[in-house]
Amino acid sequence: MLPEKIPAIFMRGGTSKALMFHRKDLPEESAWDQLFLALLGSPDPYMRQLNGMGGGVSSLSKVAVLEKSNRPDADIDYTFGQVMINEKKVDYSGNCGNISSAVGPFAVTEGLVKVVEGENTIRIFNTNTKKIIHSIFEVCHGKPLVIGDLEIPGVAGTNAPIRLDFLNPGGATTGKLLPTGNITDVLEITGIGSIRVTMIDAANACVFVQANDIGLRGDEFPSELNQRPEILDILQEIRVKASVKMGISQNLIEAAEIKTVPYVGFVSPAKNSMTISNMPIDGTKIDLTARAISNGQPHLALPLTVSLCLGVAANMPGSVVADVLLKQESQAQDVVQTIRIGMPSGILTVGAQVSNSPTGWVAQKGSFYRTARRLFEGFVYPQVDNDNL
């Protein structure tokens, strides 16, 4: 039996929103899927989730479960769930970088960690990927600082900065930074033929292709991609075939069932373009242009973990991402290289510490700045027929 109501906090993290829960307030884990679907309003054939807390797009259909960690290297255990919109499914196969930025402030406000005045580092263990994330932000009078001057693309207004350091992010999904062992591979795609891709796994598994190889400019708006189902079909075929190659799934049918990973994206050289809010992007102030598909939908910004994969791949000469950079400079070992990515909502900057060791490529760290804000706290009510569970 599910409870009539459950305590929850609604938060924005980066360019996403999620219902945030204490693990102790939830029923047994076997009931999570039914509960989360009911709370978010899924499945919804209208793709609006009006009968729940979801927002009808993948970035607004998320949940997070938190509790104190027993690990010596972590303060908080954090489980992420991507709630499908028009399917009866919750995907736990990957993490959400944006919602990760809300975890530290949640933990402080809810008294799960001890803090000091000034800068604090909250150590987060993501149970989905088995990776450690450090969330670094200011605390004032015992509470996370919210007011600040950092503006991130896709979010109106400014808030206090939160730095996320993804430690040793390689192999979060597959166990390997380069799941096939190659910087580039070739996939056979219907109607196109052989196409060169880079499959990389840093914080989440991703596959990237160059835009011109699939007949795109590279700066298409999400709305334009939605009007071109043949392009979305090509990208989905790339995604599921990459899933099998990367060892995420055994076959194409299984790959199609795993909705979150690998993410699929396309890249192109830096260029002048416009954002979805009709603001110009100066091509001289970015290093490359990128777009991503998230759970079958063109993303309005870029998932943070996709950006991390882009940052790592950009520092690997010969990858399809590095090949679109206007210039490549020699990389010093153990130095964070910053990449500026032009995407639908503006410019996103990611730092990636990557090196080529005698045993292969290694990603030591990926870093971002995000903002987060607590929006609501109270109870959520699952409209569930317990007799039919």
Image (cartoon, rainbow, N blue to C red):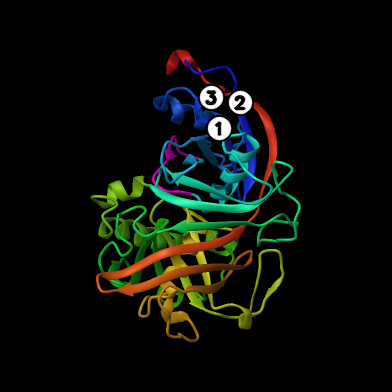
Q: Is residue 208 above or below residue 4?
A: below
Check if mark 3's residue and mark 2's residue have beta carbons within 8 Å.
yes
Check if mark 2's residue and mark 1's residue have beta carbons within 8 Å.
yes
Relative depth, front residue between 238 and 66: 66
Numbered disc 2: secondary structure: strand
Q: Position of residue 168 (x, y in %)?
A: 39, 59
Mark 3 to mark 1: distance in Å?
7 Å
Mark 3 to mark 2: distance in Å?
7 Å
Q: Is residue 355 visible?
A: yes
Q: Earlier in the sequence, mark 3 or mark 2?
A: 2
Is 151 positioned to the left or the right of 207 in the image? Answer: right
- Give the quarter of the image for residue 103: top right
Asked if residue 87 is among those painted magenta in the image, a careful observer would answer: yes
Mark 2 to mark 1: distance in Å?
7 Å
Q: Earlier in the sequence, mark 2 or mark 1?
A: 2
- Give the quarter of the image for residue 22: top right
Image quadrant containing the C terminus: top left
User: To which residue does mark 1 refer?
Assistant: 21
Is 257 positioned to the left or the right of 218 in the image? Answer: left
User: To which residue does mark 3 refer?
Assistant: 25
Q: Which mark is residue 333?
A: none
Q: Position of residue 377 (x, y in %)?
A: 68, 32
Q: Is residue 255 above or below residue 363?
A: above
Report the magenta residues as a range: 86-95
Task: Indicate the amino acid at tag 1.
Answer: Phe
Relative depth, front residue between 208 and 336: 336
Asked if residue 269 is among those painted magenta in the image, a careful observer would answer: no
Q: Position of residue 287 (x, y in %)?
A: 54, 78
User: To which residue does mark 2 refer?
Assistant: 7
Task: Indicate the amino acid at tag 2.
Answer: Pro
